[in-house]
Amino acid sequence: MLQGLYGERIERIHNETVKGFSEGAACLGWRQYPGEMPSNEMNRIIEVANQLRTTAELVVIVGIGGSFLGAKAVQDTIIPYFERNMEYPEVIYAGQNLSGTYIQQLLTYMDKKEVAVIVISKSDTTTEPVVAFRILLEYMESRYGNSVAERVVTITDKAEGALGEMTVQSGLPSFTGPENIGGRYSVRTPSIKYGSGKVRSLFEP
């Protein structure tokens, strides 16, 4: 039924999308990226992931919208919902709201564990993750001093802006995503968290 009513239109939209002519084509880089991602980039992600897994009991992911949900989706795909797999750090989230109570309770919880922080911000301007990361970075620098760069990673698509400046000032490892990949597809965050063959397979054509 739908094929008969909309078949030609669906085929036209599909062809335009494949050829990069469709509306929003500037954000469709995720379609080709699995085959275009440099192998050394994945190797670097795995290296950082393994480092975080050996130093942290708890990983705090800072992000909102797709930058948060992309990470959560892959986490839910490869980690059991109700069983804690001790092979991986516990993962919790921040930057998806502006609740002072949430942040205060989060900092209290972080005091009890060895912690790493990953922040992902596509635009580098969204209020919630920027505010949360400023607070968490101050906490991490106060707690871990010169070794903070072994525990904090940034992911963005800009070298400038608030996140870029904090990354440079603190000497943090950073991953820069292509500008033609929308935030909801920026799922390299799970790669850094888990550093496993399961996640590697998501990037292989």
Image (spheres, rainbow, N blue to C red):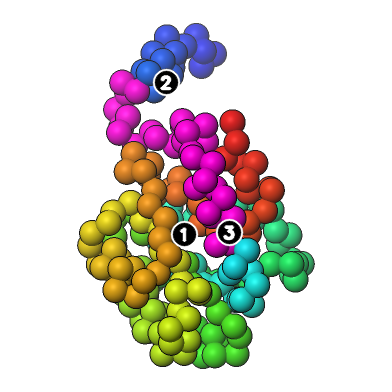
Q: Position of residue 94 (x, y in %)?
A: 45, 72
Q: Callout 2: helix, strand or loop?
A: helix
Does the residue at mark 1 contact the one at mark 2 (Cβ under 8 Å)?
no
Q: Position of residue 109 (x, y in %)?
A: 55, 87
Q: Which residue bears the numbered disc 1?
A: 68
The residue shown at (29%, 60%) is 124
Q: Which residues are magenta?
A: 20-49
Q: Between marks 1 and 2, how big is the CA–CA gap?
A: 27 Å
Q: Between marks 1 and 3, how big is the CA–CA gap?
A: 22 Å
Residue 160: image quadrant is: bottom left
Give left or right: position of 116 versus 195.
left
Q: Which residue bears the numbered disc 3?
A: 47
Does the residue at mark 1 contact the one at mark 3 (Cβ under 8 Å)?
no
Closer to the camera in the image, 10 or 39 = 39
Closer to the camera in the image, 99 or 80 = 80
Residue 160 vs 36, above or below: the answer is below
Neighbor class of circle 3 (other Cα within 10 Å; few <14, some 14-19, many 20+) is few
Membership of 2 in magenta stretch: no
**Taken as a whole, is the magenta stretch helix, strand or loop?**
helix
Specify the amino acid type for callout 3. Answer: Glu
Q: Earlier in the sequence, mark 1 or mark 3?
A: 3
Membership of 32 in magenta stretch: yes
Q: Which residue bears the numbered disc 2?
A: 18
Give left or right: position of 180 versus 78.
left
